[in-house]
Image (cartoon, rainbow, N blue to C red):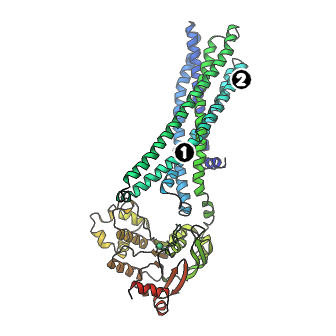
């Protein structure tokens, strides 16, 4: 129920449109009832050779309801579709904007397929909340009242019998189909998610699947899940067919019961024979509103389940956004005080780290693989939040930091490069959408990409394929370096920027790093200990602990872990 209300509150700005669409839907069913009742009256009367002038009112009624039904249906569809698309747009924007602050901490355990499923299928399930869940019961109740009042014109007993049977049909059939389809619905969601996961994994890892000869196995896995899904969906369709026939059956029973009651009344002269047709056919028309009730129950559970799945990753965001206050930055000194962090609450990736990097300092962070260097970057960029200790820029604590502000001042070359589908220019402009051509070429030169780009037929407008597939590892890395240089930053972070690059490019990049102005702060993570004398400070991390700090010269003068690392690399 809580989830349902939360979903409703997302669409509350459209409440008047929802009311209007619901009302139009009722008018459509109402016109259907009117059409059937007046036309059956007309036919029955005509069969008794009634003079035409006595049928004028009925003829006008048939014309009116015939036309109005079509018009109301059209308007209802127009408004409800419009509403659905607006809701879809709003939900997608809401989902993505709420997702950004919680990535990656809340999504790390989700596969891309699962996330994709949430972003598409779960949102689509919710999007239909109005048309499939809210509107049908409303239309049903309004139709019940309308039909009750109409039947009251013929006799209280007809109206009461109708109402009891009508309500019973609308409760019993859905209850049965809900019971039959509940487990199946969950199974279908699970299989669809699994299928998407397999598809995304298969597409992304197609080379590995081919290299390791796993194609046949992958195919058979995919097919078997697909078959299971088709079987489950077929069963779901059968249940839907069952509910349609049961609703038809309930309608016929209602008609039969009313006929049983009304025929003796006709024989006794209490009711005119013509109205037998009017009553029964009117009742048939009113069952149009019952047909969508079982579906509403089905969608109710689907919608709330999808809602739960979405809110489960997003709810945390509220906590984040509370911290989004105005941030005044007095200076850009970066300080860690007794910071500890664990990804899994089990093993600490960083333990009790303290250091200060003054504005303008060039700092290198070194250590073996798995030491915790990238984790430190994740904390500085606030991708993850430190659990213990304090991180500050100037006097502002990270927990109080306005995230947007933080993103504005930090530029980063991550260890795991991500490039977007599009051109080289598209990928650069992400860092600074309004960059001039001159700024672009300076950034490209600093990253050692100039020659490569000049040799491309379309230069900056060259398409680099999905995820930058058309670039080599080193080219991708240099493109992200150029991107980082392009951004206006106060603090720039390079995480293994020298991986995959040849020694010539490496020295070019190091020249650019060296020429970063003194007004900017640099954090340079590397395990290639080259030209380390250019750094004002070197932090050595081992097993999540900061074990040594000093300049290259100072660290080499003592018997340090750094000295051993350095000598190992230089084969001393
Ligand atoms: N998202 C994550 N979830 C759980 N554990 C993680 C995650 N990312 C990293 N780790 C673990 O945290 C530890 C530190 O990883 P980190 O990536 O910081 O190492 P690193 O010093 O950057 O290593 P490398 O030089 O190989 O890049 C490792 O043991 C790693 O397995
Ligand atoms: Mg790393």
Q: Residue at x 61, y 42 (%)?
A: 300
Closer to the eye: label 1 or 2? 1
Which of the two labelled residues, at mark 1 and mark 2, occupies the earlier sequence position? 2
Front residue (pair 222, 295) = 222
Q: Residue at x 61, y 57 (%)?
A: 315
The vertical placement of 102 against 224, above or below, is: below
At mark 1, the secondary structure is helix
Left or right: 487 as drawn, with respect to 106: left
Residue 537 horizontal/vertical position (percent): 49, 85
Mark 2 — residue? 160
Residue 307 makes an appearance in the image? yes
Residue 389 horizontal/vertical position (percent): 62, 76
Q: Residue at x 61, y 64 (%)?
A: 320
Residue 202 horizontal/vertical position (percent): 41, 54
Residue 135 makes an appearance in the image? no
The quarter in which the C terminus is drawn is bottom left
Q: Residues within 10 Å of mark 2 (few under 14, many from 20)?
A: some
The vertical placement of 314 against 148, above or below, is: below
Front residue (pair 106, 542) = 542
Count up the numbered dots: 2
Disc assigned to residue 187: 1
At mark 2, the secondary structure is helix
Residue 19 horizontal/vertical position (percent): 61, 39
């Amino acid at each position: 129920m809580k989830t349902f209300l939360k979903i409703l509150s997302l669409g509350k700005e459209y409440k008047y449109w929802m009311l209007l669409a619901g009302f139009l839907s009722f008018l459509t069913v109402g016109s259907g009832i009117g059409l059937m009742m007046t036309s059956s009256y007309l036919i029955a009367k005509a069969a008794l050779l009634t003079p035409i002038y006595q049928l004028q009112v009925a003829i006008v009624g048939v014309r009116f309801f015939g036309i109005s039904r079509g018009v109301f249906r059209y308007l209802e569809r127009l408004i409800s579709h419009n509403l659905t698309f607006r809701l879809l747009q709003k939900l997608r924007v809401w989902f993505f904007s709420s997702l950004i602050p919680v990535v990656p901490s809340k999504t790390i355990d989700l596969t891309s397929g699962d996330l994709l499923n949430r972003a598409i299928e779960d949102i689509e399930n919710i999007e239909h909340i109005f048309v499939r869940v809210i509107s049908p019961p409303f239309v049903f109740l309004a139709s019940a009242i309308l039909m009750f009042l109409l039947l009251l014109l013929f006799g209280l007993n007809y109206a009461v019998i109708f109402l009891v049977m009508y309500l019973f049909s609308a409760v019993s059939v859905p209850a049965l189909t809900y019971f039959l389809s509940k487990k199946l619905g969950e199974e279908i969601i699970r299989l669809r998610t699994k299928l998407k996961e397999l598809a995304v994994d298969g597409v992304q890892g197609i080379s590995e699947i081919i290299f390791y000869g796993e194609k046949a196995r992958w195919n058979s896995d995919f097919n078997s899940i697909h078959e299971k899904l088709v079987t489950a969906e077929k069963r779901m369709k059968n249940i839907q067919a069952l509910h349609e026939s049961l609703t038809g059956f309930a309608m016929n029973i209602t008609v039969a019961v009313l006929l049983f009651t009304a025929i003796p009344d006709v024989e006794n002269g209490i009711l005119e024979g013509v109205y037998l047709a009017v009553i029964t056919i009117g009742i048939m028309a009113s069952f149009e509103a019952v047909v969508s009730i079982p579906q509403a129950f089905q969608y109710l559970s689907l919608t709330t389940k999808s809602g739960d799945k979405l809110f489960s990753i997003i709810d945390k965001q509220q906590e984040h956004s509370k911290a989004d206050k105005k941030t005044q930055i007095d200076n850009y000194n970066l300080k860690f005080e007794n910071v500890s962090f664990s990804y899994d609450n089990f093993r600490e990736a960083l333990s009790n780290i303290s250091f200060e990097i003054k504005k303008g300092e060039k700092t290198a962070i070194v250590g073996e693989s798995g030491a915790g260097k990238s984790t430190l970057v994740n904390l500085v960029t606030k991708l993850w939040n430190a659990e213990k200790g304090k991180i500050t820029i100037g006097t502002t604590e990270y927990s109080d930091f306005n995230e947007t502000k933080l993103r504005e001042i930090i530029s980063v070359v991550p260890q795991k490069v991500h490039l977007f589908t599009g051109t080289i220019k598209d990928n650069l402009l992400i860092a600074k959408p309004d960059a001039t051509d001159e700024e672009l070429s300076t950034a490209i030169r600093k990253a050692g990409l100039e020659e490569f780009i000049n040799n491309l037929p379309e230069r900056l407008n060259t398409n680099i394929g999905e995820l930058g597939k058309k670039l080599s590892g080193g080219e991708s890395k240099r493109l992200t370096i150029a991107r980082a240089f392009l951004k206006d930053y106060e603090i720039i972070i390079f995480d293994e920027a020298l991986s995959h690059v040849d020694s010539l490019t490496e020295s070019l990049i190091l020249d650019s790093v060296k020429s970063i102005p003194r007004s900017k702060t640099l954090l340079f993570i590397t395990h290639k200990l080259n030209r380390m004398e250019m750094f004002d400070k070197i932090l050595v991390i081992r097993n999540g602990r900061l074990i040594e700090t000093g300049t290259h010269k100072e660290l080499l003068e003592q018997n340090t872990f750094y000295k051993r690392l350095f000598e190992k690399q230089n084969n001393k």
